[in-house]
Amino acid sequence: MTVFLTGLQYLGYILIFPGFLFCFFCGLLLTGIDRKLVARMQKRVGPPLLQPFYDFFKLCGKETIVPAAASRTTFLVAPLVGFAALVVVQLFIPICGFSAFTGMADIIVILYLLLIPALAAILGASASGSPYAGVGLSREMVTVIACELPLVLVLLAVAKAVGSALGTGLCFSVSEIARYQVENGSLITRPSMIPAALAFALIIPGETGSHPFDTAEAETEICEGMHAEYSGAPLAIFKLTHAVKLLTVTSLFVALFLGGIGTGIAAVDGVIVFALCVIVTALFVSFVHAVTARLKIEQVFKYYWTVVSGLALVSLVLAWYGL
Amino acid sequence: MFKKLIEESTAKSPWLFHINSGSCNGCDIELVAVLTPRYDVERLGFKLAGSPRQADIVVVTGPVTRQSLDRVLSAISQVPEPRCIVTMGSCPQSGNVFKGSYSVCAPLSKYVHVDVDIAGCAPKPEAIIDGLVKATEILKEKRGQM
Amino acid sequence: MNLTNMMDYHHYPIYAVMVLFLGAFLVAAGGARHSKNPDNPAGARAWIALCATGLSLLFLVLLVKPVMLGGETIAYWMGMRGIAGGYAIGIALEVDALSLFFALLIATAVFVSAIYSIRYMVHDECVPQYYVLYCLLAGGVLGLVLSGDVFNMFVMVEILTFAAVALTAFRTKVYGALEAAFKYLVVGCMGSTAILTGVILLYAQYHTLNLAQLASLIPGSMNDATKLAFAFLYIGFSTKAFIVPFHPLAADAHGAAPASISVLISGVLTKSGIYAIIRLTWFLFQTMELGSMQFMLVFVGSASMFVCVTMALAQHDFKRLLAYHSISQIGYVLTAVGLSSALGVSAGLYHAMNHTLFKGLLFLAAGAVLHETGTTDLGRLGGLSKKMPHTTVLFLIGAFSISGIPPFNGFASKWMIYQATYQRAVETNNIGFLLATVIALVTSTLTLASFVKVTQSVFFGQLPAEYENVKEVPFGMRLAMGILAALCVLTGLFPNTVTSVLTEPAARAVASVGEYISAMGFKSALPTPELSFAHVGVWAPIKWLLLLCIALLALTIASLAGKYDRVSAPQEEKTDTKYQLFYGGERSVYSQVGGGDLFWGFKHNWRHYFDFMHNLHSGVVNDYALWAVIALALAIVYMMIAL
Amino acid sequence: MIQFNYIAAFFLICLGFYTIVTKYNLVKTVIGMSVMDYGVNLLIISVGYTPGGTAPVFTAGELTRASYFVDPVPQALTLTSIVIGACVTAMSMSLVVRLHESYGTLDTREIRRLRG
């Protein structure tokens, strides 16, 4: 009986909170907020807050065309795998002190799991056979490489900072980092972590493929790039993945740098974390989107490997010397 | 319930794919003007899509020159159902001042079923928005019949 | 000698080696005539080779219980001639967990590649000779890792170098095969000479060739001659492991050899070099306590990792690209081993094993493509996934493994390596190790990038018209790939089992030099150290996979309920423009984005580096020889100063 | 002077290296490899040499002190090494012949299809 109940509880985690339903609603809502904010910053009225939901359901109702040149199975399965993997990543990210599944993944694993949705998109694009998708996936991969170096440096800096504070030397576990912040306050208050937080914040638009780093899906030059041949439900899943990735990356940011802000009640914390995600999105995604023009792909790469990596490196060196 | 949801959503999230079939660019500029802060069709959920695969509404401008006819038709055929075809400006409807030219194939309705015609040379943004909203209603109907 | 005595497991190591040499002899005795069966031109001789490799693997697997789990070190004197007057006079085989670990890797790769060869080599000339050389190569490598005698190691190195050179040049018609073989022979020969010089210098000092006895004599009495010998031996074995600066040879040789041989050169030959370097640094000279030595290995390892992965990104030939990757992965192994921590060694060995599995798989997949299409040029291939679906899936498993995508095996070992390097950095407060962690992580992403390139250029994208009639490869070849793919998945899903059964005993053996010496009958005062394999990270692949499966299942059900399958796919009307690719309205034409077209944004920023590297790898054998001489000189100077 | 052997041995090895590195003719490269090999052989023999020692042939009863023998092990090693050296030369020469057939030249600077 208890086994059954525990199973039910975990199933609830996977399907409802912080799994599918939570991801679905909060991810799309966050994207809606982002679109609205960008519109308001550009003095437009903007789409309704629920626009991403409409887009999603509309796409679900459309015909799905599989081109004759595509590899059918990969083309159709790739979006599903990417989204499922992303939801699983969301399960590992602690919400304030609460994490549904502890002892299963650390920050390095999360770093790699975050690659899977991008990889799934790349493989799907590749399977479609379209040359536009080919160009798109090439750019997407370069963006992934670009973001990887600063992200690695940030994560190592955090691992070192928390580890030396705890006295274990190193700390890779996300739930440990979250617990540390619950007890000692947010990491962002430490001087060594400020550049790292800034670097991570600058990575968010790149990692989520949002403006000005959306070269991979540039609709004006390469016909939506990777998704050029996608239509209907698979496209809906891709759009959903895109939205949830925004949620995942911002909530990872919140978990790593703004942790410890919470009440200890999971449901309330969920709301608080979501509010923090909205703030982070507003500052680093919407604002950046509204004020910049799309970069060229080699500029994206250069920017991440110089400016952002430099920031992260400063943080790593500061953490190394115990600040 | 889901069917209803999808139907409602179809009307609220129409994505446009714009084909220029030899237009003088007057209509094209007006279409872009519709996206600017003053008119902002995004408030109605409209969005420009980059690929016909993602589009719901195809907006055709220009007098459908012989060079572009094949291209227009193949691009339209690649739009998934339910779809809605909108001609914009007088050219694709009648040929306008180009009518009778050996290299112009207008009207477009000879080759493919056109759902909405937006008249004008070039149409005013208000007219365009009105036409597009009509198109969304047709889209919703088509979705309901699927 | 009665049968029970013969079947005593102490004899198995020598059986495992001899059965391969015997196989080579029997195949050669069978003559060079092709049999009439077009599917198997070597006839029974192929089966002899297969049986020999299978038996050899069997003998080694039977040793797992006493050596890996029981912790025994088998010391075997050939012809019962052991120690006289305190000196080893006989030829010895010594099998500890480290030797057995490498031997198992080698035997597995050799066996699988033999299965593959039968159907793969049908179009070639002189197939019987191929099997002779194949068995010789396998026997040479196996003999190297099981040997307890430093001169025997040299002899085995020579045997395997010969066989490898001959097999590299085996397809003389292949573009550049002869050239590759010659370059490999020249630099390989310089390496062998260096090894022999090192061996002789050691003999001159200590009057013995036995590894265990040398290990008991050298550490207390290091002099300039010993250091010189160390430098010579290190460089000699570096050429066998193809680590920087010997990586161009690997690229040439792997690229030109038949795929089944590339598997051996990359999965097996490089391993033997790594094995020898471990034996040298940990056992013979016991210098791994020194920071300078750790620095050297980590530096060379990181350089191999990074240089080769960037070189791989610039390649436009499938196998050449894989070849550079294989050295890049060897860089991981060397870095991890050079950390000189228990976790590092365990992680390094784990990665060595994974490298054999996934790189073998990838080379076999490349061979399958070559077998069907006749080319490995990334610019000319494309869209093969529709024609070769099984090969595509197997290739993807290999590609995910090498790029370290969870839950495949490459991830598990790379993840351990990251932790080991970072832990070491924190322990020693040395920022150099931290740099190694960062390089390792970035290299992993670049690896992914270049496999995305291969996937896009070969298996996805558009099918060129000339490959319309390509078929899936025969079952025998798919079986070989399937075995490796299954092993890739299994070793990735059960990292704890793998570490506790295979790599941790081996890592323990690496640390307990005293036992290695005393098992041979020499005195050793070296204590057996207490090892800790604790690591800071957490990763539970099975649970993750379970979660992923539940998530995927839920998603699939939801999608199916939402008519995800309401897919309109072309049935007959392939000419309908609706199902053609979108080309801005134009008629669909063949247009493949692949090979050199990809990753412009990355390459543009690094263009000076790529240009420089391209000019540096000039392809002139004199340059590579010069690199070898410079490396030798540097190694000598470094050893003189650092030790 | 026993040191002279060692100097000569290392000189030969270096000469071999020098030849391989600087000569652009394939045959000369092969010669360089052989020279290198002879250097090592000389080194091995020198290591085992004892002044005044005789050949290490088993002769029952006549010699009592082992030091009269030169060390037999290096001689065995030399034999192996010579055999291997001969194989290397044979192998490389056969490759040179095939290379000349397919490239039409013996210049290493032109035999560089594989590069980069």
Image (cartoon, coloured by chain):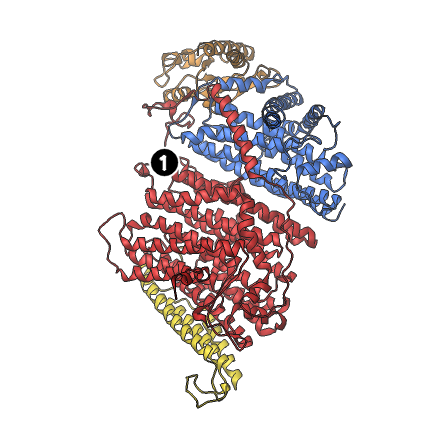
Chain colours: A blue, B orange, C red, D yellow
Q: Determine the residue positioned at 66% across, 44% down.
A: A156
- Chain designation of label 1: C
- Depth order, front residue of C590/C228: C228
- How many marks overall? 1
Front-most of C444 and C398?
C398
User: Going by the picture, which residue comes out furthest to the bottom?
Assistant: D62
- C415 w.r.t. A279: above or below: below
Q: Name the quarter where the C terminus of chain B is drawn.
A: top left
Q: Which percent across, then down, holds residue C66? A: 51, 56
Label 1 sits on residue: C463
Horizontal side of residue C236 vs A293, given as left or right: left
Seen in the picture, residue C400 relative to C251 is either above or below; the reply is above
Q: Quadrant of residue A245?
A: top right
| Position of residue C497 in the picture relative to residue C158 (left or right) | right
Left of B36 or right of it: where is D103?
left
Would residue C461 be seen by someone viewing this image from the given angle? yes
Q: Nearer the viewer, residue A184 or C104?
A: C104
Q: Position of residue C343 (x, y in %)?
A: 61, 51
Q: Residues within 10 Å of mark 1 (few under 14, many from 20)?
A: many
Residue C133 in percent (x, y) is at 35, 59
Q: Position of residue C633 (x, y in %)?
A: 55, 68
Question: Considering only vertical position in the picture, is D6 above or below C40?
Answer: below
The amino acid type found where label 1 is placed reads: Leu
